[in-house]
Structure formats: structure tokens, C-alpha cells
Image (cartoon, grey):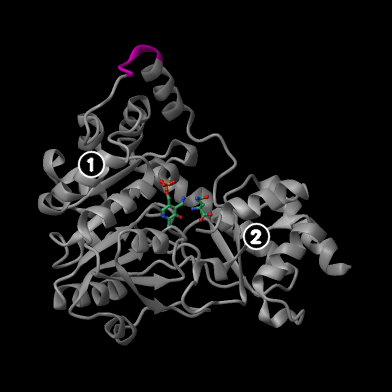
Amino acid sequence: MPTTVFEAMSRLAREHEAINLGQGFPDGDGPADVRSQAATAVTEGWNQYPPMLGLPELRQAVAEHDSRFYGLSVDWRTEVMVTSGATEALAAALFGLVDPGDEVVLIEPLYDAYLPLVRRAGAVPRFVSLDPPDWRLTADALAAAMSDRTRAILINNPLNPAARVFGAEELAIVARAAIAHDAIVIADEVYEHIVFDGRAPISLLAQPGMRDRTVRIGSAGKTFSLTGWKVGYVTAAADLLAPLSKAHQFLVFTTPPHLQSAVSYGLRKDDGYFQGLADEMQAKRDRFIGGLRRLGLPVLPCEGTYFANIEITGLGTGEDDVALCTRMTAEAGVTAIPVSAFTPHRPTRGVVRFCFAKQDAVLDAAIHRLEAWLDR
Ligand code: PMP
Ligand code: GLN
């Protein structure tokens, strides 16, 4: 398998002392109260193996979260499991619920872990390729990828790297296709709280007909801006969660208890915290995209996530996204991610992704460097 693009570009950024707007992570400290809960839990709490499905207090907090934001009624005992990041949840879902030879529909651009995991599960990937600038999902495109061997549709919403938030209409297309083919949906919703312009969080699990056929995945890394913690959570009907938990028990068995305890505290924070996260990220989006536009760069719409994309075809350099990102790191001292890394089936070579989840001064410095580079 190749080295992930995130590792490769972060390494290149370090070599050139570039501002790293490649790999998607916030450069702040995360909420002090949540971190302090973790510190207390590690010095005063239980540090041996927690239960395989996760600490009851966290599973209860996840159920409460899903009720508060999505109106769902969830049994924390049989329908919630804690994982070591959303990544492990994805692996456990694919290894636990998909058999060799089953088809899994992937919507590209797709997160880079999906395809290697689908292949390792012995499944056959089927692709739906979305196109910039609007990256719309249509019923026809989805129908063309489905068959009577489709076991699962794997969808990421809000969508990294496209910065799309599929609304109820597009999710209904997914729901209809899943129901028609008796397939499940693995819904990677790690950016659920990072949605802009008045959007509310939305979950596939809460769409009509989807309660019993959706595996919903969230991540404390994104919701609390603590990406290094690697705490994820899954909500799914008991008969889907049970086989998924069998995979989990042999992947990691469990997740560090002090982090679980702190995340249970975090998930119970008031609505102001969650809205504040969206507002803070939206302000960063506006600041950074405003800067890119001032430089005359063609910026694509951004509805959610940490990411802003530019279309490079109009720049007239004749380069593809990989060449441009490499040269920009070396010459401008700013690192981004070539979106072709997310489009293994039908490569999109004309789009470059920047992560704006950074301190304002870092975003301003990046714009400044890009300006000097473009002037040269
Ligand atoms: N899915 C998507 C779409 C992501 O962008 C990320 C990024 N980190 C993950 C999953 C993995 O999340 P975690 O760090 O919780 O494993
Ligand atoms: N999700 C992050 C991104 O898209 C990266 C996570 C990782 O490095 N594996 O940039």
C-alpha cells in the first residue's frame, strides 16, 4: 500500500519549513475543560481495560447526543460502541459487516482510508464520481453503481475534501437506493458539527427508513478539535452493531479510558459549545477564502468541514494538482493536498485542498506567502 498523502505532504512541508495547510487538523489546544477532565481521569481514575464496547458513561452520552441533535431514540447498551477513532469504526464496520465478494459503493472524492479497507475486507468497490464545482450526488449516478450484490454504501457527510454537506434531498437518494437493494449505509459523519451558513447537523441514521440499516460514525477528534485523541463512536441497530463489535474486539478491543471519560463530559456540553465550534470554523473559512479570492484564486463553495478547495485549471500553469502542490510547498512555503489523492477511480486533477482549521495568524501568513509567490 502507498504511504498516505497526509503523511507524505506533512513530511514535505517539514522539509521545506512550509506552512502546513495539508493534513486536516486544527492547530489549537482544544477545549481546556475537556482536556482537564482527561487529566483528572488519568491521575484519579481507572486506567485498566475498560469494557469492550466502551465506558457506559460515554455510551450514554453518545445516545443523549444522538437524541439531542437528531431526535433519535437510542439504546446505549446495544446500539452504541466506542472506537479508537472513526478510522477504527470504519475498519470494524467493513470487516464486521461486509463479506468477501460483496460490493461496496464508494462516493468519490473519498477519504483515503476507504478503498484500502474495502479491498482488505475482500469486497469489490463500485464508484460514484462527483464533479466539481458543485459535487452533486444524483439518483442516476448512484443507481448505476448499485447491483443485487451491493452490501453497503459508504458515504461521508459532510464530505472531505469537497466541503459539501448533503442535505435531506441527497440523503433521500441514498436512502432510496439502500432500501431498494436491501443494502446498509456506513455513514462517516465525523464533521457533523462543522457545518456553515445556518445549517444544522444532519445524520443519515435519522432519515426515513434508515434507522435499521445505517451505521453512524462520529469522532471526538473533530467535535472537540483534539484529533490526536482518536476516540470515535458508532451508533447502529443492535443486529448491525453486534457483528461490528466482533471485529472491534480483535482490532483494538478498547480505547483509553481517561479519553473516553473526558469525551463523555464533552458530549454533554451545552448547545452553545457545538454552535461555537461551527461559528469559529466558519469565521476561519471566511477569513481564508476571502484571502484566496483577493489573490484572484478560483475558490469552490464550502458548506462544511475544515477544507477549502481551489480549481487550478484556470491558473494556466499546465500542471496537475500533485505537481502544483509540490511546487507550491517548495516555492511558496505553503502546503496543500492534491484532490486526486481522494479520487482513485476517476482522478480529479484540477483541484487542490487547503485546511483552514488554523490560527488566524497562520492563515494570514499563508495568504501573504501565496501572494508573494503569485507576484513572482
Ligand atoms: N473520516 C474522515 C472523512 C476524516 O476526514 C477523518 C479524518 N481524520 C477520519 C474519518 C478519521 O477520524 P479519526 O481521527 O477519528 O480516526
Ligand atoms: N482526516 C485528515 C485529512 O483529511 C487526515 C487524517 C490523517 O492524517 N490520517 O486531512
Q: Position of residue 2 (x, y in %)?
A: 54, 59
Taking depth in this image into account, of 328 and 123 the one nearest to the observer is: 123
Q: Position of residue 342 (x, y in %)?
A: 50, 67
Can you say which quadrant of the picture contains the C terminus? Answer: bottom right
Taking depth in this image into account, of 156 and 164 the one nearest to the observer is: 156
Q: Is residue 53 left or right of residue 327?
A: left
Amino acid type at mark 2: Ala
Q: Which residue is mark 1?
A: 81
Q: Predominant secondary structure in magenta?
A: loop
Q: Position of residue 235 (x, y in %)?
A: 22, 49
Amino acid type at mark 1: Met
Magenta stretch encompasses residue 46: yes
The correct choice, above or below, for 237 with respect to 34 in the image is below
Q: Which residue is mark 2?
A: 336
Disc on the earlier residue, 1 or 2: 1
Identify the secondary structure beneath mark 2: loop
Taking depth in this image into account, of 305 and 148 the one nearest to the observer is: 148
Magenta stretch encompasses residue 284: no
Q: Residues within 10 Å of mark 2 (few under 14, many from 20)?
A: many
The correct choice, above or below, for 340 with respect to 315 in the image is above
Taking depth in this image into account, of 259 and 268 the one nearest to the observer is: 259
Q: Which residue in the rendered view is the most extreme toward the top? A: 44
Q: Which residue in the rendered view is the most extreme toward the right? A: 376
Q: Give the quarter of the image for residue 184.
A: bottom left
Give the number of marks.
2
Q: Give the quarter of the image for residue 54.
A: top left
Mark 1 to mark 2 CA distance (whole Å): 34 Å
Tell me the magenta residue range.
43-47
Specify whether residue 297 is in view: yes
- The residue that appears at 48% across and 38% down in the rendered structure is 226
- The residue that appears at 15% across and 54% down in the rendered structure is 240
- The residue that appears at 48% across and 78% down in the rendered structure is 134
